[in-house]
Amino acid sequence: MHIKPITAQYDAHIRTIIEAVGAEFGAVGDGFGPSDREVQAMSQHYCIEQGSQYFIAVEHGQIMGGGGIKPFLNSAKTCELCKVFLLPAARGKGAGKKLTQTCLDFARQAGYTQCYLDTLSEMTSAIRLYEHLGFKHRDTPMPGVIHTGCDVWMELTL
C-alpha cells in the first residue's frame, strides 16, 4: 500500500469512495462528512499552505481510500483528522494505520499540538485503530463541530 498526497486527477475516485463508504455506515446527508462540499474536489480544499493535506492509499494502481488533516476551525494548534474512508478490500491490511500515521506525521510537521476527530460508533475497527494510536475519547464534541451526526469524539496530544 502506497500513501501519497491527493491530486486533482484522483478527486472523482476519492469522492466515490467517501460517498460509498459513508453510505455503508449510514453517514448520509447533513451532519456527516460525505455530504461536505469539499468532497466534490478534495485536492482543491487541502493544501500545505493552509496547514492541510489529504492523502490517498493506492494499491496496485487502484485508489483504496484516503484521509486528511486540516486546521480545526482555523486553529494554529488543533487540527482535525478527517474523511478517513477505506474500501472494504483495503481493511484489515494495515492500510488504515499507515494512512492515519501519515496524516498524524503531517500534523506534527505542520506544528499542530492536538488532533481531534469525530466518527460513528458503527466504525468499530476505526475506533480501535484510533485508540491504539493514542486517541482518547471525549464525552462531548469540541465546540464548533459541524458533523452533528457523529456520536464518537476523540482527541490526541501530538
Image (cartoon, grey):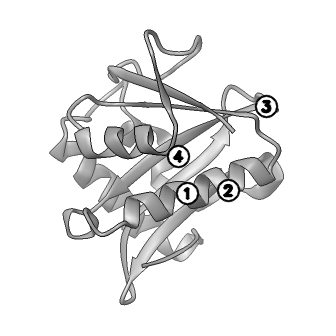
SS category of the residue bearing label 3: loop
Local packing at callout 3 (Cα closer than 10 Å; few below 14, some 14-19, many 20+) is some
Q: Mark 1 or mark 3, which is nearer to you?
A: 1
SS category of the residue bearing label 1: helix
Q: Residue at x 68, y 25 (%)?
A: 73
CA distance for labels 1 and 4 = 22 Å
Which mark is first along the chain, 4 or 2?
Answer: 4
Q: Which mark is residue 101?
A: 1
Is residue 127 at all visible to an observer of this figure? yes
CA distance for labels 3 and 4 = 22 Å
Amino acid residing under circle 2 = Asp
Please give the residue where the numbered disc 2 appears in the rendered image. 105
Which mark is first along the chain, 2 or 3?
Answer: 3
**Dots 3, 4 in contact, CB < 8 A:** no
Local packing at callout 4 (Cα closer than 10 Å; few below 14, some 14-19, many 20+) is some
Q: Mark 3 or mark 2, which is nearer to you?
A: 2
User: Which of 64/155 is in front?
Assistant: 155
Please give the residue where the numbered disc 4 appears in the rendered image. 38
CA distance for labels 3 and 2 = 14 Å
Q: Residue at x 55, y 28 (%)?
A: 155
Q: Which mark is residue 61?
A: none
**Dots 1, 2 in contact, CB < 8 A:** yes
